Image (cartoon, rainbow, N blue to C red):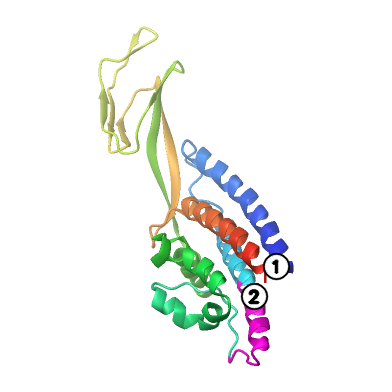
Amino acid sequence: MINEINIKELLNSIENRMKKLKTFEKEAGEDLNKVELDSIEVMNLILNLRMCLDWANNDIMEKVDAEMLKHNTKRKKQNDYFPYKETEAELEKSIPQIKQYLPNVYGIISSIQYFDNNQHWLTNICKLTKNIKHKTKEEQVKETSVAEINFANHINLPVGGNSNIKISGNYVDGVKQENDVIIKNGKVESTDKLLRVIENAEFKFKESNIFILKLLYTSYEGIKEFHRALYKELNKI
């Protein structure tokens, strides 16, 4: 099945492109000019992830057709898109031939659905794909939180994302600092020129409140494992 190779190659490409976005996001914590991820690349990655699933679905349906032919029957309508459903009853209704003729494959499809694993990545990727195709691009928001405080390049103090910290009476290289360091809920309220605050940045979609790289990486890992399990089963048939 040619799509087995195509999906693997596309996943490799997706991984390499995600790494570039991850580097950009890491740099964005200290670079105020980095206000959003490359929106075209983000959209292409989401579409490519969905494409992996639809390609896999084509191979699944070829196997279904072959099994149905053995029973002198055929599908009444084409099913070119990978299914995503909120409940198992909805999934069974949408792909009855797969459950009947390829029950093990049905189980693999079910394993990445929200109702089975309580993860939202499949639903989010598929809904975002629909939005990208029929609406405008998703607006992004940059969120920052304090990662650590550097004292004159000598000492790094790690800081949690929602920390509340106040550091008073600070001396750096024998020089008393004019201002206290004040951090509330991970946000800097006050600091001093010799105290460098290092921030983390994360980008999310404004409307859906979904963190972009978390979704991309979670989806990538889920599809990679799905691909491995699916073709192990399909190649037995």
- At label 1, the amino acid type is Asn
C-beta proximity under 8 Å, tags 1 and 2:
yes
Residue 145 belongs to the span the image colors magenta: no
* Horizontal side, residue 188 vs residue 26: left or right: left
Predominant SS of the magenta segment? helix
Magenta-tinted stretch: 57-76
Quadrant in which the N terminus appears: bottom right
Judged from this view, the residue extending furthest toward the right is 2
The residue lying toward the viewer, choosing from 127 and 53, is: 53
Asked which quadrant contains residue 45, the reply is bottom right
Residue tagged 2: 58
Quadrant in which the C terminus appears: bottom right
The residue lying toward the viewer, choosing from 72 and 56, is: 72
Asked which quadrant contains residue 61, the reply is bottom right
Q: Residue at x 57, y 47 (%)?
A: 21
* Horizontal side, residue 78 vs residue 96: left or right: right
Sequence-first tag of 1 and 2: 1
